[in-house]
Image (cartoon, rainbow, N blue to C red):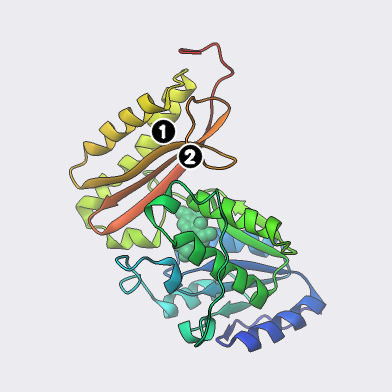
Amino acid sequence: MKENNRLRIIRGVRQMQALADRLRTQGRIGFVPTMGALHEGHLELVRVARKNADFTVVSIFVNPIQFGPKEDYRQYPRDFTRDRRLLAGLGVDVIFYPDVKAMYPEGFATYVEVERLTRYLCGRSRPGHFRGVTTVVAKLFNIVKPHVAVFGQKDAQQALVIRRMVRDLNFDLKIIVVPTVREPDGLALSSRNAYLTPEQRRQATVLYQALRLGERLIKSGETDPVRVKQVLRRLIRTQPEARIDYVEIVDTAWLEPVPRIQGEVLIALAVYFGRARLIDNLIVRAPQSGGKNS
Ligand code: AMP
């Protein structure tokens, strides 16, 4: 028999581990790690977790060690009351909601680092970011003890880094990656969209337009990544408030910049609008040679 489905809020690590042990005797645990300020993208991950498990655990933790010293850790949006209401509506069983001291007590000194996959894109722009992500996710896996964990393609590099960590460190669980959930105009949902002024919000649609333009160029036979990146940068710069962090075309295995576009590539963007740093990406399959420049 499944335990009663009242939503439980757990704040202690030991308490969560004990509950996870109990739940595992009764069924499979699906897990969605988040930093809260939930939106439809997160909720889609939760629905997928529910479909793939008997119990669903969502963690809400704004992880200080994945933010750089000049980043938005303090300003990051937090609204636990709203998050709890949304998750209750979806039939989530447990919210794991630790405070920073519970996760990083005095004397904490162990970090998990995935190499190679973290050299480019956000790994290059945000030194230490992925070390913070893999460390907290490894801890959360040991605390929540899931059979299945669900992540979003919106953070493509993060999803690959987590998959690599799970393989390399033999975590006994399955990773599911869910397609990016977008606004009707294409903007990827993000907790950081809350930072945008109405004008920046309008201009931010250029991110998805740039990805789709890149896709069209590649599909029509363009194989030179330098040229594609140049065209995308030019389009993004038509928006006066956009400040480009990176525009990259990388392979989908190791996320390394490609000298020539062939097979499957990832177009990845990071662009600031005011203080909001937005990222987005699209996987594109190049046509089988025979096109322009082949
Ligand atoms: P965050 O709370 O931003 O750390 O995100 C928690 C999880 O939600 C990560 O696995 C993200 O990739 C995922 N996520 C965030 N935004 C979206 C989106 N628009 N579509 C799908 N998944 C998302």
Residue situated in front as seen by the camera: 192 or 39: 192
Name the residue type under label 1: Arg
Mark sitting on residue 282: 2
Query: Could you tell me if residue 183 is visible in this image?
Result: no
Residue 230 in view of the camera = yes
Q: Which residue is mark 1?
A: 212
Label placed on residue 253: none
> Residue 250 vs residue 31: left or right?
left
Side of 101 where 114 appears, left or right: right
Q: How far apart in space, not on screen, are marks 2 and 1 (Cα)?
A: 8 Å
User: In the displayed structure, does residue 201 sit left or right of residue 78?
Assistant: left
Q: Earlier in the sequence, mark 2 or mark 1?
A: 1
Q: Name the residue at 71% across, 80% down.
A: 20
Asked if disc 2 is less than 8 Å from ligand 1, the answer is no
Marks 2 & 1, CB-CB < 8 Å contact: yes
Q: Secondary structure at mark 1?
A: helix
Residue 91 position in % (x across, y down): 61, 72
| Furthest residue in direction left, as rendered | 240
- Work out which quarter of the rendered image holds the N terminus and state it: bottom right
**Front-most of residues 140 and 47:** 140
37 or 287, nearer to the observer: 287
